[in-house]
Image: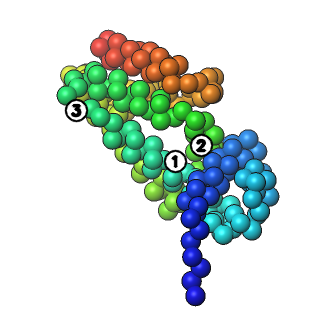
Amino acid sequence: MARTIAKDHDLKRVQILKSAAKVFAEAGYDRASMTQLARECGISKANIYHYYDSKDAVLFGLLDTYLCELRDRVCGAELEGLGPEDRLRRIVSEIMLAYQGADHEHQVQISAMGALPEDQQKLLRAYQREMVQFVSDALAAVAPGVFAGDSAKLRGATMSVFGMLNWYYMWNSGAGPKARDDYARLAADLVLNGVKGL
């Protein structure tokens, strides 16, 4: 007879992944152990193996969940009725707010994705590419004359946006929504004013 799924199954998976993000970010993925993860979760190691059969499976579950949800939130931002500049401002703000509370996940994404098999990395990079394309399209709409026919310039500008946003957690970890929204406005202003001067 098949084992029934516990009522708190999904909640436990979320708890394991959140704890894994902290352990992998603080200890480093290579040095982190399932014993450390179990301790952080407050459950037995055997219980973790009920949800994930290996440390690699935990890492993939963590990054797949984080990047898929991030992609859905950013690319699903409400932009109806906004002009190109306000669309870009809304997207930048959405990214900053989506990053809130995910400093550990962000760090693990940067430092540990390469530990996964290539097919899993390919799936995770696809989420990233969708977000990059979404921001790139918004930037191109702001200054079509500047970027027309110059994909290298557009890519450079797009990655500069992510560069400003992705490292925020390094020097302002734990910032709340207001600080993040203030920084999003600053970053958007820098981008918009810079694009106009290109």
Badge 1 vs badge 2, beta-carbon distance below 8 Å: yes
Report the quarter where the C terminus lies: top left
Can you name the residue that lies furthest to the front here? Answer: 7
Residue 158 drawn at (x, y percent):
39, 30
- What's under tag 1, amino acid-wise? Tyr
Residue at image x 39%, y 19%?
A: 188
- Mark with earlier residue (3, 2): 3
- What's under tag 2, amino acid-wise? Glu
Against 112, residue 179 (above or below) is above
Left or right, 77 with respect to 128, comes to left
Left or right, 12 with respect to 38, comes to left
Residue 57 drawn at (x, y percent):
61, 62
Residue at image x 23%, y 26%?
A: 82
Question: Mark 3 to mark 2: distance in Å?
Answer: 30 Å
Look at the numbered disc 3 and give the secondary structure of its residue.
loop
- What's under tag 3, amino acid-wise? Glu
Q: Is residue 60 visible?
A: no
